[in-house]
Every structure is written in structure tokens, then in C-alpha cells.
Amino acid sequence: MNEVKRPEWREALRGFRERMGGLTEARKAYAKTDRETRQAVRDALRSGPKTVPAIAAETKVSGQAVLWHLMALKRYGELTEAGRAGDYFLYALKERDK
């Protein structure tokens, strides 16, 4: 049976993880929480542009954590600034190509 070959970087990453003792439960839990928080921020923005405090209130996540995730989403092209509301920037999800 033909085995699907992984890209070299994936093999290197897998080897590194094995040498470092694998993924601990704490790391897995952190990654899961991180994904869930980022998804909650995306879900909050689906209804339209919002400020950091508005997203924090809706998601029950600290403003600092919300800002961290917003900057990650912006860096990877999922988010844009959509003006201002008082002293705060408004953030909105970018439209996806269909």
C-alpha cells in the first residue's frame, strides 16, 4: 500500500516534538483554549464591526486576550479595522472569496 509522504517540515516537527517529550496535556489544553477563544472572537464579529470592549463583554474574555487574538487575526488577513467608535477602533471580519 502506498503511504502518503509528509512534507519534510512536518517530519522535522514531529521528530522535534518526540525529542522534547511530545505534547503535554497542559500544552494541548492551552492550544484548545486558544482555538476556542479565537473562534469566539470570530463569532462575535460575524454580526458586524465591534470594539475590543464590546467583544470582551460578549465573549466574557479579558480585553487584553481579545486584543491579542484580534492582532493575530489581523496579521493573518482575516480581520480589518473598520473605523473608530469614540476612542476605540472598530474591527470587522474580512469578506471571504466565494
Image (cartoon, helix red, strand yellow):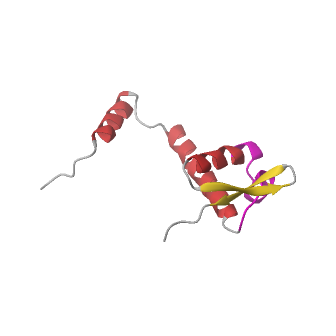
User: Image quarter for residue 58?
Assistant: bottom right
Furthest toward the top, the residue is 19
Q: Nearer the viewer, residue 64 or 28?
A: 64
Residue at x 60% of width, y 57% of height: 39
Q: Nearer the viewer, residue 94 or 54?
A: 94
Q: Is residue 63 magenta?
A: yes
Residue at x 65% of width, y 55% of height: 80
- x and y percent of residue 52 in the render? 76, 51
- Judged left or right of residue 64, residue 79 is left
Residue at x 74% of width, y 42% of height: 64
- Judged left or right of residue 26, residue 91 is right
- Judged left or right of residue 96, residue 58 is right
- x and y percent of residue 36 in the render? 60, 54
Q: Is residue 15 magenta?
A: no
Residue at x 35% of width, y 32% of height: 18
Secondary structure mostly seen in the magenta stretch: helix
Looking at the image, residue 53 lies above or below residue 9: below
Question: What's drawn in magenta, residue-wise?
Answer: 48-65
Furthest toward the bottom, the residue is 98
Furthest toward the right, the residue is 86
